[in-house]
Image (spheres, rainbow, N blue to C red):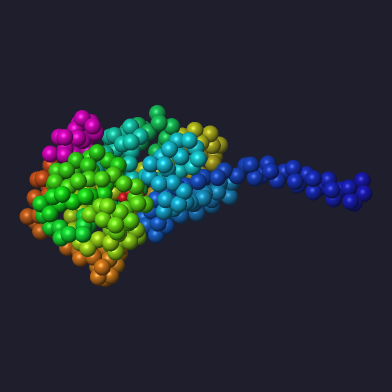
Amino acid sequence: MNIKLIGAAVLGAALLAAPVAMAQQTVIKFSHVTTPDTPKGKGAEKFKELAEKYSNGKVKVEIYPNSQIYKDKEEMEALQLGAVQMLAPSLAKFGPLGVRAFEVFDLPYVFPDKAALRRVTDGPVGKALLAKLEPKGIKGLAYWDNGFKIMTANTPIAMPKDFQGLKMRIQSSKVLEAQFRAIGALPQVMAFSEVYQAMQTGVVDGSENTPSNIYTQKHYEVQKYGLETNHGYIGYAVIVNKAFWDGLPADTRAQLEKAMAEATVYANSIAQSENDEALEAMKKSGKIQLSKPTPEATLAFRKAMDPVYSEMSSRIGQDTIDQVLKATS
Ligand code: LMR
């Protein structure tokens, strides 16, 4: 064989091998709705870094933040269809999928602090909830924190009565709907990506969200008042398409599990400071007037919202509520 032919043979072999090598790379499309500059955004970046490292480049993670390719409802459908492989939706967004027990996380004032929350997510309740996703073709891998929610509106808000008649944007959770009805507000389900414009144009008067979300989505530029109620929690379930996950080679799956475990520790370690910094930044901006509720106001909110527990008992499952209350007390 002359040199040219050897060269051609080598080139041919390389060309034949190339698609094989490329086909061996697993791509995980990770879609989410917040900016990269949030607890979830940073957690996703950390997972990408670790997944690519531990798999020696066999896995590539492509992150699509800020509702770039899918909004709230669409991303769930895209995951089930396999158009994306990984998401981290808020725990308040699993109801439309038919997994209503997750709405236990939306109950007003259910978690006195993060430690109580962690006992739920890391305990049997957390595990049982993730298991409920499997018949939907979804595997739950981890819980990631955002933080506790505050109220915002375009009219002064201090007491429950101030919410009478206000159009409040909510995530797609019946518990959140009941919570706002309990204080006389008019809850409106809306995709996260649409909230800024809805606030700006007066389609809604206010909302509830974490300081990190309010800051990074610039809601504070179109809301005049904020009340630091910390009445509820926003966190995420990191989920994957189950068929995709089960179809991975065992060693790759183990590498990704390790990456996810470490990314979870990281995401949960930064969530509080991300929210604290966002709150400070909003205070400094002078664009929104933030205040803390008085002890009387907190008591009044708790009292007004308390009936939500019994109203939502059959939807969530009283056993789940009881288990959560036991773990948090
Ligand atoms: C919201 O819709 O307000 C949040 O769930 C967004 C998010 O993912 O934190």
Query: Does 27 appear above or below 226?
Result: above
> On the rendered structure, is 218 left or right of 205?
right
Report the quarter where the C terminus lies. Answer: top left
Residue closer to the observer: 258 or 244: 244
* Residue 254, percent from left and from top: 50, 41
Residue closer to the observer: 184 or 283: 184
* Residue 84, percent from left and from top: 49, 42
- State whether residue 231 appears in this view: yes
Q: Residue at x 14, y 46 (%)?
A: 184
Q: Is residue 278 magenta?
A: no
* Residue 97, percent from left and from top: 35, 34
Q: Residue at x 54, y 52 (%)?
A: 53
Q: Residue at x 33, y 32 (%)?
A: 98
> On the rendered structure, is 86 left or right of 209?
right
> On the rendered structure, is 253 left or right of 312?
right
* Residue range highlighted in magenta: 307-329
Toward the right, the furthest residue is: 2
Q: Is residue 322 magenta?
A: yes
Q: Residue at x 28, y 61 (%)?
A: 222
